Image (spheres, rainbow, N blue to C red):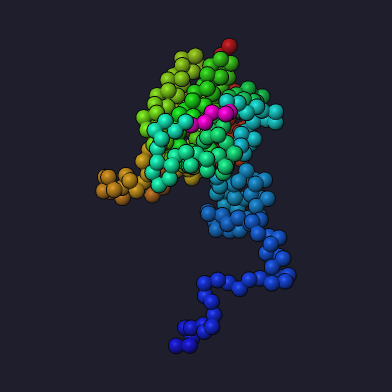
Amino acid sequence: MSWFKRENADLTSAPAPEGEDAERRVRTDGLWVKCLGCRQAIWKADLEANLNVCPKCGYHFGMDAQERVASLLEPGYELVDQGLRSTDPLNFTDIKPYKLRLEQGRRQTGLDDAILNAVGDLGPIPVVLSVMEYAFAGGSMGAVVGETIARAVDRSLAGRKPLIIVTASGGARMQEGIVSLLQMAKISSGLAQMDDKRIPYICVLTHPTYGGVTASFAMLGDLNVAEPGALIGFAGPRVIEQTIRQKLPEGFQRSEFLLEKGFLDAVMSRKELKQYLIRALEFMQVPA
């Protein structure tokens, strides 16, 4: 039985490193990232230089809203429509108060809510860009997110500039009840005005995009483009399986599956996305 026992040993923790080993661990801590695709270790600086795409297998890591804006727009862009904050209209509490969740989101992301608007140039083309931040309450859409995107639509209408929205969301923010659901119609109505005036709107869907966001503006683009491997849908796969009591196809709700079924126009790697959007907008040519 002694073969299967380690006597006088604490199996709950590894021994603390000492001397040179400890110094080496301190210097390298946090400098490597394990890829969720190929399971290989990646030097963090290499990953960031590659737009958070694994250089070995092409797996797309998450990207925060500020990084996304910087990756698409030329230097000199301007962040706009900031300072809007939810008022917690329902004074909502579940496991914790909604106000506390909002405070945590602001501390973690440095944003007022799960959205960031910017105006600038995408290559040679002036655009309005609206990017959702998944790290803030799962990118959920409440009154502030809806109003901020609506203001982006208004800017596009006023300046006749193309609008690009980058989605990353779990859907409508239920802590705000019907107020969150109203944003679906509010944004869709503005996009209909853009369509009437023939001003291009492109939606870039990233992992994940779900719920009321998918059911409204995420699928209303003149061009709907997704990143590789992104999960996109209304309800999650497990909810659907439990409802219809059937096994879903392999890769169900992944962007490649949706492209095959006609829900998307293209699946584009992050490294190629900017040039693809420029070519698309040049083809659309905003009328004077």
Residue 85 coordinates in the image, percent (x, y): 52, 31
Front-lying residue, 120 or 83: 83
Q: What residue lies at 53% left-to-right and 53% top-to-bottom? A: 37
Give the answer, above or below, for where 100 lies relative to 45. above
Q: Is residue 286 visible?
A: no
Residue at the spot 64% in from the left edge and 35% down from the top edge: 70
Residue sitting nearer the eye, 277 or 219 = 219
Q: Is residue 268 left or right of residue 95?
A: right
Q: Main secondary structure of the magenta part?
A: loop
- Residue drawn at x 40%, y 47% is 95
Residue 270: x and y in percent read 58, 40
Can you tell which quarter of the image residue 72 is in? Answer: top right
| Res. 287 visible in picture | yes
In the image, taking residue 261 as reference, residue 243 lies left or right, namely: left
Q: Is residue 93 above or below residue 156?
A: below
Can residue 85 be found in the magenta stretch? yes
Please report the residue visible at 49 percent of the width from the left and 29 percent of the height from the top.
144
Task: Give coordinates of residue 100: x percent, y percent.
Answer: 48, 42
Q: Is residue 190 magenta?
A: no
Pick out the residue farthest to the bottom: 1
- Residue closer to the observer: 257 or 44: 44
Quadrant where the C terminus lies?
Answer: top right
Question: Bounds of the magenta span?
Answer: 82-86
Instruction: Please provide percent x and percent y for residue 196.
Output: 46, 14
- Horizontal side of 24 relative to 241 (left or right) equals right
